[in-house]
Image (tube, rainbow, N blue to C red):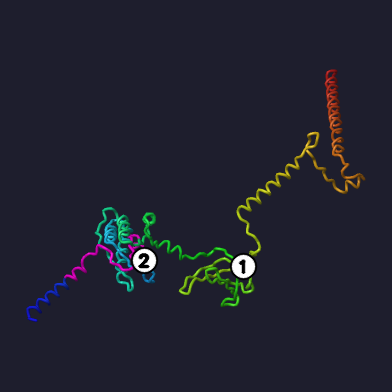
Amino acid sequence: METRDIVLLAVTLIILGEVSYLLAKLPKTSIKAKDRAILVDTSVLMDGRITNIAATGFIGGTLVVPRSVIGELQLLADQADADKRARARHGLDVVSTLQNMEGVEVEILQDGSKAAEGVDERLLSLAKRESAVICTLDYNLNKVAVVEGITVLNINELAQSLRMQHLPGEHMMIELTQKGQDNHQGVGYLSDGTMVVVEQSNKYIGQTVLVEVVRSLQTAAGKMMFARRVERQVSKKAETPAMVVAKTKSLGRSRRSENELANVKHADGQPQQQPKRQKPQLAQKQNQPQTQVQPQSVVKPMQQQKPRATYHASRKRVNHEDSLLKLVDSQRDD
């Protein structure tokens, strides 16, 4: 092979290498991910919890950040609102953090710095064209994507699923199966395997007790809760609001019925009067049954005394007038 041919071959290889390098650096207008592509929304980047999920290795695909999403973050970062500006800058930092994470694949899709139809519409069209998944916190975008038949990864739904089912202050029934680390503790387990440590319950092992959750812990080994026993017995049924209302109504009916019986009238139209009780000493003096005492016997002497008092008063007045008349007549005679 001549020297000229060797030089031409070397130049050709150099040109091919430069072309390949330029092609690699050209903007990517289509997703090149081999596994599942996850389109990241603006709300997810501004939220920031995607970094914690990615660090645990539960992403399960390639995070694709469209250039239109970054353009929207840039637009929000230039606004006058301090709150939105800080959140948008935090979203740009999240993109850089994801790119520098080991074991996390991040791809920037060059779909244009601005989306004339809107970022949400651009994400929906990209997801349909590339058969990708949308990761968002936007409620409306979530609903529209479900209607369009697009798979949605919502971090809020993930957090709700991982939340503790029993919060401090809640009551629940649990069966104590063994002793705890301390001698006074009793240990039971929920249906999902969560260990519940109940204070001062070692003598109730083998029984089902009512407990109140004090605090909950989430550790690498699983969930764990601490509780205390409630004094109310298990067999005692708690009164529901409906039972309380029914009980109140029954008491009201019974009271009304008692009042109606008390106001029952005799055949002559007079209300029934209960006989008055007399003292035992009075009954002994009269040597009569207590029921035969008539209240009119006390009233009659009082009625007879009033005319007598009136008669004596009128007689005194007449005598006084007579004495005055006699005195006047005597003075005339003088």
Q: Residue at x 50, y 64 (%)?
A: 165
Please tell me which residue lies in front, 294 or 298: 294
Label 2 SS? helix
Which label's residue is closer to the chain start, 1 or 2? Answer: 2
Q: Residue at x 86, y 35 (%)?
A: 300
Q: Which residues are magenta?
A: 19-47
Amino acid residing under circle 1: Val
What's the distance in space between the residues labelled 1 and 2, CA to CA? Answer: 41 Å
* Rendered image: mark on residue 292: none
**Is 160 located above or below residue 296 in the figure?**
below
Q: Quadrant of residue 186?
A: bottom right
* Rendered image: mark on residue 209: 1
**Is 243 located above or below residue 260 in the figure?**
below
Amino acid residing under circle 2: Ile
Taking the image as drawn, is residue 57 in sight?
A: yes
Residue 26 part of the magenta-drawn span = yes
The residue singled out by tag 2 in the image is: 50
